[in-house]
Image (cartoon, grey):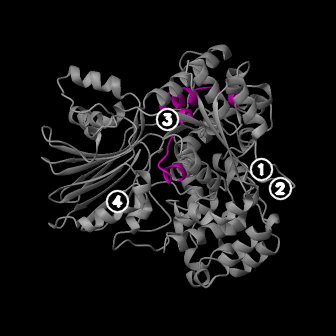
């Protein structure tokens, strides 16, 4: 896991290495082990390394293959690199390192723009062809690894986070009204290529981009998720066994492809508990688990220790338990915001940030349960939209998912940020894309390929990488996702959701974990809008900077702040928190 950056000039000038160094400085936390740079005419690369596979200098980056005339910067992990390496060696390629990085260079030399199709894993990378003078960038199918860019007529720059790009000059930091519409409709999701800033864009998942020396660009999708029933029907037992085996493969890949120990973020929920059970099933002896808890509130416990402890007792894991006082939660919230590449409304971001700080003292890599709910139908709004009979797919979905109706945007935002119902148009297109048999198939496909990319997946990447910790997400293994997308919706929604996972877990994971009510990462101090938390949001929204920025109508803010816990989104998020978090992020980013 690393931080990558680069600059390509179109105006005959050479890149300014001050820009590369400025970006690398903002990427240091993602890669604390090594720094390197490379330049060739109009192109310069910068890299910060977190050493996980082939810890020797041979796998340091930027990696240059002089024989092939290719240079690479790469962030991520390729889980099938041993198989690819053997295949490429059989084709006559010679390797000078033992890691996954060099495999990407050889794959590109062999298959060109089709190289990403051969990679199983999470990745964002850039390859400079020194002979053809062209730049090739690619992002993994699920968008687990980030890739941001900024461009004008003279320059194209890219980096692993927005902070790196903002450290360089001439970035347009005006707010994008269409992105704002996404942000406040989809609980902080702004689908690629947009970000909240007009001058910063991001590569869509499952896409590659080729940029020529004269500035010509070719964006190409290399993968689609098909959510249709297979040609040969399967029984329930056959589905369960197929998913079970695919999960074993996914967990084994993410444990074994590393030259350092791999832990598990154990929340006490079904998903992370099942990961522990699967590691035990495939014969892993020293399973390292990590759990965090916070102070209780009158309405809610601040920890799920009773569930995680049961898993630890069952599997005798090497367990680490951390407790964070509420005063630390608020005090350190600005740190978490400063490490967000984009605004994130999920209040568990601070939980992941503080947990990652502690975990990074013990391991460099962890497995995490993100994606299970979206792949296997675990959230309460899935049956709601599934059972709705509206023939219009957007109207069958939006009333259960959108944070605000389009009409509320005009009430909340000042007129320069008013726009048409852009989010509705975008989501309609996602839901009506071919190759989904049923409405829920289309919903889950949109969630897995678009919505979670810029919510839980990005949140986990940002908060773990803030401490040089690599998070691996087996529930988003591409082969598992492809298989699950073919499964009938009723096998996902039965028994309160995630039926197949519960069946796999039964007899392995403690029943108390399987049968517990659906839980969320508990951060009570940030869930209940009162006391110091409320005062903090009031101070942010009524600050001089916020008023001068002119995003919000203050009649709307006054109304919400008078009764903050009365204004919740359809999935129980605080509308006040959404507004305050965006302003906090903008102030922290210096926008």
Q: Nearer the viewer, residue 204 or 70?
A: 70
Gap in Å between the C-alphas at discs 1 and 4?
37 Å
Q: Identify the element where label 2 is drawn.
A: loop
Gap in Å between the C-alphas at discs 2 and 1?
7 Å
Q: Are marks 3 and 2 in contact (CB under 8 Å)?
A: no
Please state the extent of the stretch shown in magenta in the rendering.
Answer: 463-492
For disc 1, the marked residue is 302
Q: Is residue 126 visible?
A: yes
Gap in Å between the C-alphas at discs 1 and 3?
37 Å
Q: Are marks 2 and 1 in contact (CB under 8 Å)?
A: yes
Mark 1 or mark 3: whose residue is earlier in sequence: 3
Mark 1 or mark 4: whose residue is earlier in sequence: 4
Q: Does residue 508 belong to the magenta stretch?
A: no
Q: Please give left or right for residue 288 compared with residue 158 in the image.
A: right
Depth check, mark 1 against mark 3: the one in front is: 1
Q: Residue 465 placed where, x, y %?
A: 49, 50
Q: Identify the element where label 4 is drawn.
A: helix
Q: Identify the element where label 1 is drawn.
A: loop
Mark 2 or mark 1: whose residue is earlier in sequence: 2
For disc 4, the marked residue is 24
The quarter in which the N terminus is drawn is top left
For disc 2, the marked residue is 297
Q: Are marks 1 and 4 in contact (CB under 8 Å)?
A: no
Q: Does residue 469 belong to the magenta stretch?
A: yes
Q: Which residue appears at 21% of the width and 57% of the height?
A: 43
Q: Residues within 10 Å of mark 2 (few under 14, many from 20)?
A: some
Residue 25 higher or lower than 376, as above or below: below
Gap in Å between the C-alphas at discs 4 and 3?
34 Å
Mark 4 or mark 2: whose residue is earlier in sequence: 4
For disc 3, the marked residue is 225
């Amino acid at each position: 896991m690393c931080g990558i950056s680069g600059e390509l000039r179109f105006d005959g000038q050479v890149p300014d290495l001050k820009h590369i160094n400025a970006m690398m400085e903002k990427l240091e936390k993602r890669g604390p082990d090594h720094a390197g740079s490379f330049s060739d005419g109009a192109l310069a690369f910068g890299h910060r390394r977190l050493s996980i596979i082939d810890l020797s200098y041979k796998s340091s980056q930027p990696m240059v293959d002089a024989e092939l005339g290719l240079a690479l910067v790469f962030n991520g992990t390729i889980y099938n690199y041993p198989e690819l390496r053997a295949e490429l060696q059989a084709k006559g390629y010679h390797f000078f390192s033992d890691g996954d990085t060099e495999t990407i260079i050889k794959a590109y030399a062999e298959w060109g723009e089709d190289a990403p199709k051969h990679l199983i894993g999470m990745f964002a990378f850039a390859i400079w062809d020194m002979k053809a003078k062209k730049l090739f960038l690619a992002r993994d199918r699920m968008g687990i690894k980030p890739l941001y860019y900024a461009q004008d007529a003279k320059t194209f720059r890219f980096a692993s986070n927005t902070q790196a790009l903002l450290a360089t000059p001439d970035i347009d930091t005006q707010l994008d009204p269409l992105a704002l519409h996404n942000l406040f409709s989809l609980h902080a999701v702004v689908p690629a290529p947009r970000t909240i800033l007009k001058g910063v864009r991001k590569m869509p998942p499952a896409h590659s981009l080729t940029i020529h020396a004269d500035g010509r660009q070719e964006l190409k999708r290399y993968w689609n998720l098909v959510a249709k029933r297979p040609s040969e029907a399967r029984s329930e037992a056959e589905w369960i066994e197929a998913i079970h085996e695919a999960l074993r493969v996914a967990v084994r890949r993410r444990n074994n492809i590393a030259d350092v120990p791999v832990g598990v973020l154990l929340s006490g929920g079904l998903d992370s508990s099942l990961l522990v059970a699967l590691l035990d099933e495939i014969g892993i002896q020293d399973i390292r688990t990590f759990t965090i808890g916070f102070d209780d509130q009158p309405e809610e416990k601040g920890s799920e220790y009773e569930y995680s402890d049961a898993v630890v007792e069952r599997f005798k894991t090497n367990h680490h338990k951390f407790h964070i006082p509420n005063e630390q939660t608020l005090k350190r919230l600005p740190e978490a915001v400063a490490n967000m590449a984009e605004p994130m409304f999920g209040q568990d971001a601070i939980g992941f940030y503080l947990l990652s700080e502690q975990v990074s003292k013990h391991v460099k890599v962890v497995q995490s349960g993100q994606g299970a709910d979206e792949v296997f139908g675990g959230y309460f709004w899935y049956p709601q939209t599934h059972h709705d009979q509206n023939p219009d797919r957007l109207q069958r979905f939006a009333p259960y998912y959108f944070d605000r109706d389009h009409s509320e945007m005009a009430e909340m935002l000042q007129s320069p940020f008013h726009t048409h119902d852009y989010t509705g148009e975008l989501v309609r297109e996602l839901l009506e894309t071919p190759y989904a048999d049923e409405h829920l198939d289309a919903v889950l496909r949109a969630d897995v390929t678009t919505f979670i990319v810029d919510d839980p997946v990005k949140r986990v990447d940002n908060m773990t990488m803030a401490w040089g910790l690599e998070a691996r997400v087996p529930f988003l293994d591409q082969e598992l996702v492809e298989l699950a997308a073919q499964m009938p919706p009723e096998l996902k929604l039965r028994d309160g959701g995630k039926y197949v996972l519960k069946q796999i877990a039964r007899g392995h994971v403690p029943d108390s974990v399987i049968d517990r009510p659906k839980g969320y990462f508990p951060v009570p101090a940030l869930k209940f809008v009162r006391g110091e938390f409320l005062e903090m949001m009031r101070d942010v929204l009524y600050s001089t900077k916020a008023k001068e920025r002119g995003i919000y109508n203050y009649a709307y803010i006054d109304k919400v702040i008078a009764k903050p816990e009365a204004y919740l989104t359809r999935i129980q998020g605080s509308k006040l928190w959404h507004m305050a978090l965006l302003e906090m992020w903008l102030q922290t980013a210096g926008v």
